[in-house]
């Protein structure tokens, strides 16, 4: 049996065919899914999905504001999210984090400033501490800043999902007690460094995920990803 520990079931191309997606997941041996919220609306939708688990697949949810959505943060956001974090199906604060690829330093990828992303992240990390919830972290091109901010919250626990950084970053996160989540990246020919980290990651600190509808594993690369593909991630890591 498989647990897809990170899947965006609220994404339109999965939500629009949810029944079929869950049927295929169940047929592939996937019996549990963590449905990720990355803004207020998606978080609410993920909670609704989790409250009506079907097709023999149990669904849990998260709630949070993704760094690419940091411009949406306002004075009411914490209260809106806190209401969601208190729902019984919500297992974590996330997806939150830093994305310095999509910041204001890259005009072709407009996003929030790094300072704003860090502020939004800290606000949500503090809530996770107060509510005693784990966090689901996004990290792109922000290794040192993320590690530094995590150091400000020593009681945090959680996972850095879709791990794609260097071994040294993995070691520092593992020392802090975090889990590493691995996606279909481990099946890509040009991702040997990710495979190397996965091969060295202690099994009791390793999670498998699809990040569906993104990052479909080989041989489905380029197609819409879905939870039924998570066994391919597990099989690749098992071979490693």
Image: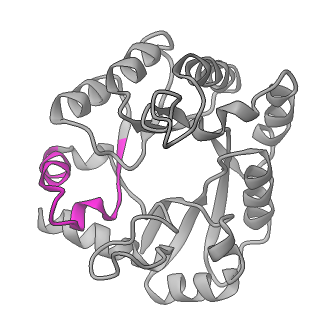
Q: Quadrant of the N terminus?
A: bottom left
Horizontal and vertical percent position of residue 165: 26, 38
Horizontal side of 240 relative to 156 (left or right) equals left
Q: Main secondary structure of the magenta part?
A: helix
Q: Which span is picked out in magenta?
A: 180-200
Q: As displayed, is residue 219 above or below residue 33?
A: below
Question: Which residue is the extreme one toward the front?
Answer: 107
Q: As displayed, is residue 48 above or below residue 107?
A: below
Horizontal and vertical percent position of residue 59: 65, 65
Which residue occupies 30% across, 75% down?
232
Horizontal side of 190 relative to 147 (left or right) equals left
Quadrant assignment, res 217: bottom left
Can residue 82 be seen by looking at this rendering?
yes
Which residue occupies 38% across, 50% down?
162
Which residue occupies 37% across, 40% down?
179
Which residue occupies 48% across, 77% down?
224
Horizontal side of 7 relative to 71 (left or right) equals left
Horizontal and vertical percent position of residue 130: 69, 19
Q: How many marks?
A: 0
- Let me know if residue 192 is in the magenta part: yes
- Let me know if residue 13 is in the magenta part: no
Question: Which residue is the extreme one toward the top?
Answer: 152
| Colouring chosen for the image of the structure | one colour
Q: Quadrant of the C terminus?
A: bottom left
Can residue 95 be seen by looking at this rendering?
no
Horizontal side of 63 relative to 112 (left or right) equals right
Q: Nearer the viewer, residue 141 or 105?
A: 105
């Amino acid at each position: 049996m498989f647990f897809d520990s990170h899947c965006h079931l609220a994404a339109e191309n999965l939500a629009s065919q949810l029944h079929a997606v869950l049927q295929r997941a169940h047929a592939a041996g996937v019996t549990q899914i963590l449905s990720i919220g990355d803004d207020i609306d998606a978080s609410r939708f993920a909670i609704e999905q989790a409250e009506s688990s079907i097709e023999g697949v149990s669904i849990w949810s998260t709630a949070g504001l993704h760094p690419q959505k940091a411009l949406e943060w306002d004075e009411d956001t914490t209260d809106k999210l806190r209401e969601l974090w208190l729902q019984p199906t919500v297992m974590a604060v996330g997806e939150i984090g830093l994305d310095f690829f999509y910041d204001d330093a890259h005009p072709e990828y407009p996003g929030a400033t790094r300072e704003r992303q860090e502020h939004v992240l800290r606000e949500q990390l503090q809530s996770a501490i107060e509510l005693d919830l784990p966090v689901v972290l996004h990290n792109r091109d922000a290794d040192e800043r993320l590690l530094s901010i995590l150091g400000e919250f020593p009681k945090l626990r959680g996972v850095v999902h879709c791990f794609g950084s260097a071994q040294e970053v993995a070691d520092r996160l593992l020392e802090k007690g975090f889990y590493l989540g691995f996606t279909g990246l481990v099946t890509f020919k040009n991702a040997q460094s990710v495979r190397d980290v996965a091969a060295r990651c202690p099994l009791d600190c390793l999670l498998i995920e699809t990040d569906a509808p993104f990052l479909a594993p080989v041989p489905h690369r380029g197609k819409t990803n879905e939870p039924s593909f998570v066994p391919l991630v597990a099989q690749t890591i098992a071979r490693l």
